[in-house]
């Protein structure tokens, strides 16, 4: 007689019961998990991904600024970095290295709230653009510049004193450095458009450096200045209203050191223009006649012209007066000898 081993049937798990449940005609609601909710709303607890604004947060967050890319502006600031490296080396007599960290867009009010204090804010005026910009120097760079210019020892970090305003000596030295940078900015914009940047005033309170409305968009350029073991950061803020007069120039694509100009195309265009053929009309006389007389003209009739052998003939191109001359003959051909050119007026240029 064979032994029979009793078998027990395992009870189904709740998940299996839910999956194998018969269809009762109703629809089961699907519950979103936490990851799906965070992805939908744009929230993330990871600090590394806090800068990623997506979902509903990207719609309701007014701090985000959508701006068009200005290719020539990046070239201008790259040129500014090279110029600053040379000029600050001559200014400090030290080994200075300037690097461009980032070029971003931000709202002006958000930038004022994010400035780490204490700092010196320099308001400068762009004369040709008829607007203002902001230049921020942090405290580390301020004390480093003072330490370098006044003969501080190498290898020692600049001493930072909390709780006191900047002295007149510190403000004067920083002002001299900012004036050097302003000259470099003029040279950086020169190939694109002549712009004169002049220092307007120095401020230590961001509320007194309001050069635009808080909601206005601006370009923020972050620069790093290193002087061996010392240095700091400086930031350049240009509102979009300041760059609006040269916006079309900033939208150009970079075509070499000529800043948007292509010498090959210019020479080719000039060659083609010189070889272009145009039709010149010699106007002997102009008369005003009644319409009925014009309608009654027949073949064989003779019209008398008011021009004589010594009358001046006007040469025109598509109705635009160009030259005056006198009628003559060269061999079997009728010719016009040019006497003088007609000076074009504003009305003729509009034709």
Image: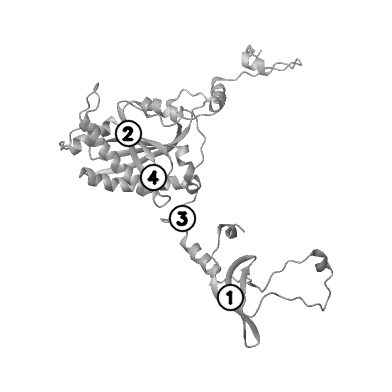
How far is disc 3 from disc 1 in space, using C-alphas? 46 Å
- Residue 50, x across and y down, in percent: 46, 27
Specify the label residue 255 is tagged with. Answer: 3
Tell me what residue is drawn at x 41 percent, y 48 percent: 75
User: Label 3 near label 2: C-beta < 8 Å?
Assistant: no
The vertical placement of 268 against 112, above or below, is below
Q: Nearer the viewer, mark 2 or mark 4?
A: 2
Q: Nearer the viewer, mark 1 or mark 4?
A: 1
Dot 1 surroundings within 10 Å: few (below 14), some, or many (20 or more)?
A: some
For this rendering, which residue is in front, 155 or 213?
213
Dot 3 surroundings within 10 Å: few (below 14), some, or many (20 or more)?
A: few
According to the picture, the residue beneath numbered tag 2 turns out to be 201
Asked whether residue 237 appears in the rendered view, the answer is no
Residue lying at the far bottom of the rendered structure: 331
Q: At numbered mark 2, what does the secondary structure look like: helix, strand or loop?
A: strand
Who comes first in sequence, dot 2 or dot 3?
2
- Residue 339, x across and y down, in percent: 54, 75
Dot 4 surroundings within 10 Å: few (below 14), some, or many (20 or more)?
A: some
Dot 2 surroundings within 10 Å: few (below 14), some, or many (20 or more)?
A: few
User: Label 1 near label 3: C-beta < 8 Å?
Assistant: no
How far is disc 1 from disc 4 in space, using C-alphas? 56 Å
According to the picture, the residue beneath numbered tag 1 turns out to be 325
Residue 312 placement, left or right of 239: right
């Amino acid at each position: 007689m064979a032994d029979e081993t009793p078998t027990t049937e395992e009870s189904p798990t709740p998940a299996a019961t839910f999956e194998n449940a018969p269809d009762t005609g109703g629809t089961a609601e699907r519950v979103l998990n936490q990851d799906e909710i965070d992805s939908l709303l744009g929230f993330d607890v990871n600090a590394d991904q806090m800068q990623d604004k997506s979902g509903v947060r990207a719609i309701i967050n007014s701090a985000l600024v959508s701006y068009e890319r200005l290719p020539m502006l990046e070239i201008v600031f790259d040129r500014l970095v090279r110029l600053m490296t040379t000029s600050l080396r001559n200014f400090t007599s030290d080994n200075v290295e300037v690097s461009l960290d980032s070029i971003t867009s931000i709202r002006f009010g958000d930038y004022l709230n994010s400035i780490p204090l204490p700092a010196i804010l320099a308001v400068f005026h762009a004369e040709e653009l008829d607007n203002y910009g902001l230049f921020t120097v942090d405290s580390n760079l301020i004390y480093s510049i003072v330490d370098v210019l006044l003969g501080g020892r190498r290898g020692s970090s600049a001493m930072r004193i909390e709780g006191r305003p900047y002295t007149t000596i510190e403000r004067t030295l920083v002002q001299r450095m900012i004036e050097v940078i302003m000259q470099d900015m003029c040279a950086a914009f020169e190939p694109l458009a002549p712009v004169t940047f002049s220092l307007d005033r120095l401020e230590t309170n961001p509320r007194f450096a309001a050069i635009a409305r808080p909601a206005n968009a601006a370009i923020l350029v972050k620069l790093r200045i290193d002087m061996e073991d010392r240095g700091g950061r400086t930031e350049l803020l240009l509102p979009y209203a300041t760059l609006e007069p040269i916006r079309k120039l900033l939208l150009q694509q970079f075509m070499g050191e000529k800043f948007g100009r292509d010498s090959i195309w210019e020479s080719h265009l000039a060659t083609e223009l010189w070889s272009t053929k145009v039709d010149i009309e010699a106007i002997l006389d102009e008369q005003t006649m009644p319409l009925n007389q014009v309608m009654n003209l027949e073949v064989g009739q003779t019209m008398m012209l008011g021009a004589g052998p010594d009358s001046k003939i006007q040469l025109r191109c598509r109705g635009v007066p160009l030259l005056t001359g006198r009628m003559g003959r060269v061999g079997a051909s009728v010719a016009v000898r040019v006497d003088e050119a007609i000076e074009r007026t504003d009305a003729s240029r509009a034709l």
